[in-house]
Amino acid sequence: MSHALTRLRPALPLLGLSLASLATAQTTTPKLDTGDTAFMLISAALVMLMTPGLAFFYGGMVRSKSVLNTMMMSFVALAIVGVLWTVVGYSLAFSGGGNAIIGSLANLGLKGTINQLTGTIPTPVFVAFQAMFAIIAPALISGAVVDRMRFGAFALFVALWSVLIYSPLAHWVWSSDGWLFNKGILDFAGGTVIHIAAGISGLVAALVIGPRMPLTRRATLPHNVPFILLGAALLWFGWFGFNAGSALGANQVAANAFMTTNTATAAALLMWLGWELLRGQKPSAVGAATGAVVGLVAITPACGFVSPMASIVIGVLAATASFWVVQLKHSLKFDDALDVFACHGVAGIVGALLTGVFASKAINPLGSGAVDGNWGQVGIQLLGVLATLAFVGVGSFVLLKLISLVTPLRVTERQENMGIDQSVHQEEGYREGENALTAPVMLGGD
């Protein structure tokens, strides 16, 4: 096998290549395509925008005393993972010479990636695109622990989780050496690697850290609904780069992924509002934003393999499942503050399994599901879901327990009562309103 094809193979689940182009790749040297490169640079930038979008989405949902801390957890993920992915994360996920569980250190510090190609794009562009995926995954987890997790403990968790959990899981699913890749799992843009992983990690973190104090929970209502809508809109916009960009080129599969992403999202939003109406509630802006995010999550693993009509079904079923899990949350003991597991874990699971149902070779020759008579694909998707839940769930629990030996995981009762923004960051989101101060914030406080 040529070195060029070896470079191409780790991205095959993401690529919208035809069988003919794969055969050609084995006999010709890959050539840089400037159109594909421009498309992927824009896609990477769109995916980067999703993390600040998530900051607005989460920030609007918490009380005003915690808005800055909540948004900072997303911004610090940009920095921590941005460095670690370059140093070691990419190599562990995608470098050759590894095994079925983890990549090698061949690309440590991005050694050997300069002036190389991945498909028709420069390998550094592929590295940057994948970096944005690695960044948003731990940022998603923050929604489960807002208002109570120490900022330093969260930052340490992001660093360890990115290297020890995200990179191995990405290797399993997207590297040609990975064991789930070789089982034939279909995950076009990160349903298992990002959303199920973030969902189960958020649930575990909420259980380990414990619930917010009763007074805090009662006071936690969305303080800025326009922030929530802005965040959802930025996520929807950036998700086109997330999903269509996962074709790694401006091609037919990218076009289909763009269309299915928009359609599933719209269907899920409508379904969420429909459930609110059926339960005698008013159609809410928060519900519309949540339904849209659920649709985006659910279509992620399927977008490059299914038809637009199938994406409607995926959006409707995912919104239904996530909506009812959110309703059940109030009777359960865990405090997943912003419903990370319901919206990302559950919708990710629904999307992953339905990928096995609706994947069609008519859409992408690399994907075949039950609609093509390949019912075995559903079993492979289920294996991927269960493996992700087990590995990430246990791994997150272990990491949190280890971190707790170094630093407390949660803030004190006094800090939680007064608000994390003041006690941790010595800043406030607003000078007027609920959190107004009568005196300047003093440095060197609690």
Image (cartoon, rainbow, N blue to C red):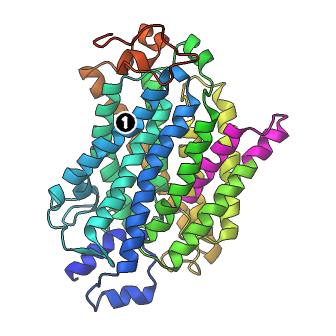
Is residue 205 placed above or below 312 in the rendered structure?
Answer: above
Instruction: Specify the amino acid type for callout 1.
Output: Ser
Query: Residue placed at 32% from the left, 69% from the top?
Result: 10
Q: For residue 71, what is the image quadrant?
A: top left
Query: Residue placed at 45% from the left, 44% from the top?
Result: 52
Would you say residue 341 is visible in this rendering? yes
Closer to the camera in the image, 345 or 189: 189
Query: Residue placed at 43% from the left, 69% from the top?
Result: 14
Is residue 204 placed above or below 353 in the rendered structure?
Answer: above
Magenta residues (range): 272-301
**Quick one: label 1, few (<14), some, or many (20+) residues within 10 Å?**
many
Q: For residue 325, what is the image quadrant?
A: top right
Residue named by callout 1 = 396
Quarter in which the N terminus is drawn? bottom left
Residue 68 in picture, x, y percent from top left: 45, 28
User: How would you classify the magenta stretch by its main secondary structure?
Assistant: helix
Q: For residue 95, what is the image quadrant?
A: bottom left
Residue 81 in picture, x, y percent from top left: 30, 45
Would you say residue 177 is visible in this rendering? no
